[in-house]
Structure formats: structure tokens, C-alpha cells
Image (cartoon, grey):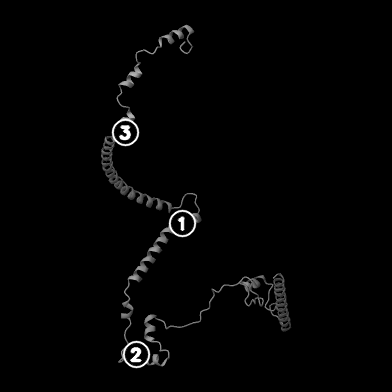
Amino acid sequence: MPHKRAKRSVREKERAERTTDQAPSQASRNLREESIPKSIARVLNASQIRSEWKQSLGKRKREQGNTEAVSQRRSQKKSRIKGSDAGAASEDLRLSQMRIQPGESLAHFNKRVEDNMRPLVKSAVQSSSAHMRKLAKDAPKTTDRKSQKPLNSSDPLSSTKMKQLRSGTKPDPDPAQDRNQSGKPSVDFAKASTSTPKSVNDIVQAPPQIKHLPRNAKKILATSGKGKKSDAVVSMVQKAMMEAERENAIQRYRELKERRLKEHHNIINADS
């Protein structure tokens, strides 16, 4: 077997045959025939190798540039085609989404439509506001000056207005101008502000007064047959007693509220 160690006699014979004066082997012959090692040849011929590499690199770059230009033109053409196809596909998808789906409730459908239309509405509002700002910015400033007509001294109305302005009195309004602006005469009414915020801890000064009967109260009493007009009549004594009780209740409520406020302030002062 080749992996087994040879006998001693065989080993001694091979050792005797291995003398110093022997013919060179095939491996040593190949090394001797090689003039210069490859690493040293690479160092010595570095300039030539570098120039060859640059030439091949420039050739590759030119070929790559041509191929990239061709591929870029093709990709642009494909992108244009895909863009048009994508726009049409997105439009079809949007229209298909605007339809109610099977098993979908009307509330969910309305919410989905609002979510889809919200960016479109927002972009439209932004574009319109930007357009209005651009128009206001580009409008010439001389239009207001030209629109204002100078007051001629020959005009009697203008002279009276000038006198009123000089004297410090308010000029009379022009009725013709009011009629031109609106078909109806201008009337100023006092506007009640209902948008004032109400506090949560507002103090009630008095209980509410119910001056009107509930809806269909008379009809219910008439149909039931139990209620009569005489039942709803309250005597003066009963009315006076009710008013007195009402005033007493209001007074007790106010005293209770004042006492609680004082206790609250005392607690805050003691803590501080």
C-alpha cells in the first residue's frame, strides 16, 4: 500500500541512491529555464502595463458611453410611454375606487371618497390662492390713484363735501351711491355677538323661567279630557306664595354659593 511505510532495507537503499551528484529534476529544470520571475517582470514593465491598461480603459469607457447613451434614450422613451400608461392607469384606478364596493356601507364609501379627494381639493385651493396672490402682486399700484376722481370746484356736491371736511363734520352720505351699490337702502343694525366663549364655572344668578308651554301641550290636554281651562288658573295668593318661594330659593342659593367661595379662598390662603 502506498500509504504504508517501506521496509528498512528499501529505505536504506533509497537513501544510498540519494547522493549529491545527481541529475536535476523536472521542477528544478523549469525554474532554471525561467529568465526573470513574474513579480520582477511586472515591476520592470510597469509603465508598459499601465499604458496598455489606460488604452483598454479608454476604449471600454467609450463603448460604455455609447451604450449608456443608447440605453438612456431607450429608458426616456420607455419612461414617457410608462408615464402616459401610468397616468391612464391611475385615472382608471381612481375612477374605479370612486365606486362603491360590494359589501361596503355608505358611510365607509363616503369617508373613502373624502380621503381620496382631500389632496385634490387642497392642491386646488393652494393653486387658486397662489394665483390670487400673484395677481395682487402684479397689479399696478396706479389703478387706485386713477380710479379716484379729483374733486372739481365747479361741482356743487364736491364743494359742499370739501366744506364739510374742512369744518370737521362728517359728510352726508350720497343716496345715489347707496342705491347703485345695493337695490335696498343701507340700514345699520346692532349685531349681537353670540360667539363669546362661556366659562364652565359660570354662576347661575336665577333659575330659568319657562314662559311657553311645551309643544302640543294644549292638544294633549284637550284629547285626554282631564285638563280644563279652570285647572290652569292660578289664584293671586298662590302666585304670591310661588314668587316668595322662588325668591327664597334664589337667596339661599346665592348664600350657599358665596359661602363655598369663601371656604375655597380660605383653603387656598392657608395652603399658600
In the image, residue 95 lies at what x, y percent? 40, 53
User: Label 2 is placed on what type of residue?
Assistant: Ser
- In front: label 2 or label 3: 3
Q: Secondary structure at mark 1?
A: helix
State left or right for residue 238 relative to residue 70: right
Name the residue type under label 3. Val
- The 10 Å Cα crowd at callout 2, few under 14, some 14 to 19, many 20 or more, is some
Where residue 59 sits, quadrant-wise, is: top left
Q: Are marks 1 and 2 in contact (CB under 8 Å)?
A: no
Q: Is residue 153 above or below residue 130?
A: below
Residue tagged 2: 158
Of residue 16 and residue 1, the one placed in the foreground of this image is 16
Residue pointed to by mark 1: 115
* Mark 1 or mark 3, whichever is nearer to me: 3
Q: Give the CA distance from mark 1 to mark 3.
A: 71 Å
Residue 4: x and y in percent read 48, 12
* Residue in view at x 37 percent, y 85 percent: 176
